[in-house]
Amino acid sequence: MNVSRETLQPFSRAYAKLVERGGDATVRLTGADLLSVVLPFHGGSYLLVEDDEFESIFYLLYKKLLPSFCVLTNRVFDSPVGFEGAIDRYKNSASLYIKDPGRLLLIDRSTYELGNVDVFNPSEVCVVNSKTSYDVLLSALDRAKYWRRPCVSCPGDFSVRGSVIDFFPKELSFPVRVDFSYGSAVLFQFNISSQITTQKIQSVRFIVSSAGLESVSVSSFLLDLHPLFFSSSVLSWGGGFENNFSLSACTYDSYLSGAFSSEISLELGSYGVFLNKKLFVPKWFVTKKPREAVSQSPISAFDGFGSFSVGDYLIHDDYGIGLFSGLLSGECGEDSYLQLNYADAKINVHISQIRLLSFFAGAQTSGVSLGFLSKKGLWKRKKSSVSKKIESFVLNLYNQHLSRISTTKNREIIDFELLNDFVSSFSFIDTKDQATAYKDILGDLSSPLPMDRLLCGDVGFGKTELAIRASFISVLQGSRVIVLCPTTVLCYQLLGAFKSRLSAFSVNVASVSRLNSTSEVNNSIDLFNSRGIDVLVCTHRIFNYVKSLVDVGLLIIDEEHRFGVGQKELFGETFPGVDILMMSATPIPRSLQSALSGIKTMSIISTPPINRLPIETSVEYYNINRIVDYIRFEVGRGGQVYFLHNNVVSLNKFKRAFLSRLDMVRVEIIHAKMSPKKIKGVLGSFVSKEFDVLVATSIIENGLDIPNVNTVIINNAHLFGLSQLHQIRGRVGRHHRQAFAHLMIPRSLRLNGDSRRRLKAIEENVALGSGYVLSSKDLEIRGAGSVFGYAQSGGALVGFDFYNKLIQRIVSRGSVGLCLDQVSVNLFGDSATIPSAYVGDSALRLSLYRKLSLINHLTLLVSFSVELENRFGMLPEGVSLLVKSQELRLRCFDLLILSLVLVGDLCSLVFLPSKHLGTLTVFLSGVDAFFAARNVSYKFNKYSRERLLLSFVWDNKNKDILVFISDFLNKFKNGFVN
């Protein structure tokens, strides 16, 4: 057995000593997840597992034991077309590692006993390392029949962008980026969701061609490999009786609650481990500062709403809805124009004017009417009508805002010592965004103005803890709290969460929902009014009692989009000074967030909890035997399971099926038509681990947060919306264990376009924080919902993208008087472009043009440039000029300069009236001195609506106009003082 002695840390050394004793041994694990901790010390081995655990064990291991992890099996995994699972790719590639002495081979009992297995016999293998040439790699990928794509998204894809080649080996669980711009090849692993590199690697290999399937003896693959056996959480080798030791996980919560002597082990990440009775912990357990490596991969700067594709319906600011028919080249041979077809003509929009275009509907949308260029008045009237509705909507928000800030509250002094004790009692570590949001909330509740904040964050990102802290602060100030939530199940869950955190600090919590009798509700209301209860967690039922409430200091609304405007305003009208904290797990577009930031205070949580693992997600044909295997595995590792079937009538059928096939597994049912008492009893029993499998309808979609449940099986997944699937999947994965989501569809089903796109989107977007990406995909698939008055303000007439733009303009009209999308910069003409040699796919180039035009902050622009270089290699001159153009747009926007354009030799700038002009004579004098010092002639003209037009001829070919303009903008910003 091979045990590496290089850079062994304390746990590694301790475990290695046990392994090196030789002879037979048995390791008792508290869960199969711990296999990934110990198996790296068993290189050159094969792991034999029972058939019913084989798939689950594979998914626990395949991302963590690379690159020499391989699979040997005759089992058939029949996945829907287009949803091939990782195990299908792995199972025939064992021969790739036949000469690797450090390989770890996974084999199931049936294949082991059968004695023969069909494997691919590779006739050519490509080894990619620093010595590999660009042409050799491209040729190998072509011969291996990899698919060339704009971006690599699944195994078998490759992408070429100038000096960078991305590819996803079919035999591995991660994609590879090879950058040839450094002279020799440099290899990286990268994140499939963010497309950003995560770590440098030395080499990979993949099968280029094979002689087909070959039946060979299992023994030939097991030759020279040490045998390991795993069953029912026991790992053994040899007879397993000579040496016996145990391994168990220690969570951070357990570490805090116990008095353990421990040893820091740098190689541990998410949790500590007990080896026999000795505890080894990651460093962050002691320092409470998790290392970066165990936090989430970065979110791409390219994520967002409103990308364009050929065939989409776009809105031009001046002409209305047109059909995007493609990109056109200019004199330089690269992208210069976007062509839009209208009902009676075509127009070409220069790339520098892409800001004038907004996404309206996808190419597959039916019933879209094109605009008429000859009837511009129709579009102007429609735009004007929608603008008036939006203006009314924004004015209403402003009035609410002004009304609330005109009200002041006399707040009691907060006992910060007690508050800090309460915050410290939280068992987990705040993420950066959580900490920032908490400061925002604390600041609001310390201010004399009433709080009105939206807390927005993905599923499971820690919004509830912040709501609990807000409640505690409010109670410390002598106020009482109402927590509103949309469903009975969520109410029950929140009641438990609030009680578990607040009761130890003498804060009394009760509930008002369908689960409470009328007498219980009346009693709770009376106690709330008499200060016997501090916090009431309620469903819609509380609206019947609002007039009975004596006083409410803080209103928390969870899933705020599930409540009507009138319902939310009822509390504000009844209690004018009430603090309001609204929470939503539905991420909103950054453009809308930016537009409303001036009149709505928001806190965005985009970083996942420390050490949270992405949920392994698979789309499969319904198979009762596989479902039984998944349940048996989860229960076997001490966990619990949700089985979601959204049909009340047939729930009992599944309960009987599971009970008949699973000995000692306890199963219960829950659905919304059950009596309140029964729902309460079932939920309480499940939380208390009195049964193992909850067969449920979509009643569990919102709010159910039970850390011990780490497998969810969704039957008829094609019937759910994308956001629903994301919410349901978010019910698991709240533990240090690897969580699984199995999406089942009928074998007879023929997936239509939207269903396929939904399932593919949920399968591919497993990264933590992917709710934002999924929201944009959901918007493309089904259109926007009623986010922030979208429906009420006529947004459906002009599309969600253009609606955001109109909001931004109306909001900015009342503040700076200019919106970024109104600023035009074209200093480099057709030279500012993304060469096709740099980004080959036209749709991806267009997406980059679009995303660049939407960047509204210099720090985001820097991030965008860094990511461009990370994904595509060193920036060509044309791309650098594009980035510089956007930088100039941002600087002009900051200085209220409407346009900066160079046509031929004539350069012109249009200034809006602003504080930057100061005293006009001082401004004119400063401009004159600047141009005189550089010997450049200029002139001023009056422009419409009190604007000033500055123009000059630039004929100095030996100097860079960019330097000249940058100097001018710097001088202008400083009032020409220095």
Image (tube, rainbow, N blue to C red):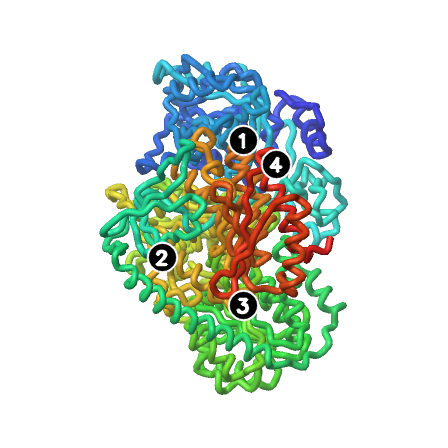
Q: Position of residue 754 (x, y in %)?
A: 30, 48
Is the residue 814 above or below the residue 247 in the image?
below
The amino acid marked with disc number 3 is Lys
Real-space CA distance between mark 3 and mark 2, rounded to the nearest whole angstrom: 30 Å
Q: Position of residue 769 (x, y in %)?
A: 51, 49
C-beta proximity under 8 Å, tags 1 and 2: no
Nearer to us of marks 3 and 2 is 2
The amino acid marked with disc number 4 is Lys
Q: Which residue lies under the disc numbered 4?
A: 959
Mark on residue 873? 1
Nearer to us of marks 1 and 4 is 4
* First reached walking from the N terminus: tag 3 or tag 2: 2
Left or right of 745? Residue 802 is right
- Find residue 17 and report its image quarter: top right
Mark on residue 600? 3
Q: Position of residue 370 (x, y in %)?
A: 26, 54
Nearer to us of marks 1 and 2 is 2
Real-space CA distance between mark 1 and mark 4, rounded to the nearest whole angstrom: 28 Å
* First reached walking from the N terminus: tag 1 or tag 4: 1
Is the residue 20 above or below the residue 149 in the image?
above
Q: How many labels does the image show?
A: 4
C-beta proximity under 8 Å, tags 1 and 4: no
The amino acid marked with disc number 1 is Gly
Real-space CA distance between mark 1 and mark 2, rounded to the nearest whole angstrom: 37 Å
